[in-house]
Image (cartoon, helix red, strand yellow):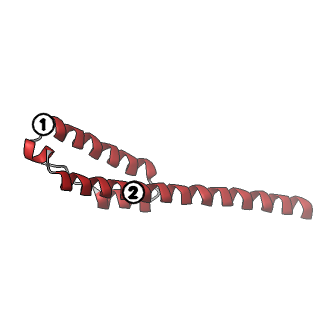
Amino acid sequence: MTPALPTDAIRTCIANNDFDGAHALLVEHENALRATFDTGTDAEKSCRESWLQLLAAQRGLIDELRAARDDAARSLERLGRDSRAVKAYLQDAG
């Protein structure tokens, strides 16, 4: 049986900025998929359309994870710039 992609759990991790957790879930799913190719039936291995849909869903979640991670990095960068600006202002004012 093809393992189900834990979409909701991955999105929950992304929403909570738990990028390592989301990545771990994706890796765990990938490992389960690889195991399916080792132990799955010929019918499971040869269902091309299902595999392509699953691949598209995985790629979509990876894109969501990447976008959220990039947004968080930009926010941290902005916070650092703002913090430096406040420090410079306070030094000039003091």
Q: Which mark is residue 13?
A: 2
* Mark 2, other Cα within 10 Å: few <14 / some 14–19 / many ≥20: some
Q: Amino acid at mark 2?
A: Cys
Q: Residue at x 70, y 56 (%)?
A: 80
On residue 53, the disc is none
Residue marked by disc 1 = 39
Query: Is residue 88 shown left or right of residue 76?
Result: right
**In this picture, residue 10 sits left or right of residue 42:** right
Residue 37 point in image, percent of width and height: 18, 39
SS class of the residue under badge 1?
helix
Q: Is residue 94 visible?
A: no
Q: Nearer the viewer, residue 51 or 19?
A: 51
Q: Position of residue 20 (x, y in %)?
A: 43, 47
- Is residue 43 toward the left or the right of residue 90 in the image? left
Few, some or many residues within 10 Å of mark 1 (<14, 14–19, 20+): few
Q: CA distance from mark 1 to mark 2?
A: 30 Å
Name the quadrant of the C terminus: bottom right
**Residue situated in front as seen by the camera: 19 or 67:** 67
Name the image quarter holding residue 40: top left
Q: Mark 1 belongs to which amino acid?
A: Thr
Quadrant of res 10 = bottom left
Q: Is residue 27 left or right of residue 20?
A: left
The foreground one among 36 and 78 is 36
- State the image coordinates of residue 39 (x, y, percent, origin top left): 12, 36
Is residue 37 positioned above or below 69 on the image? above
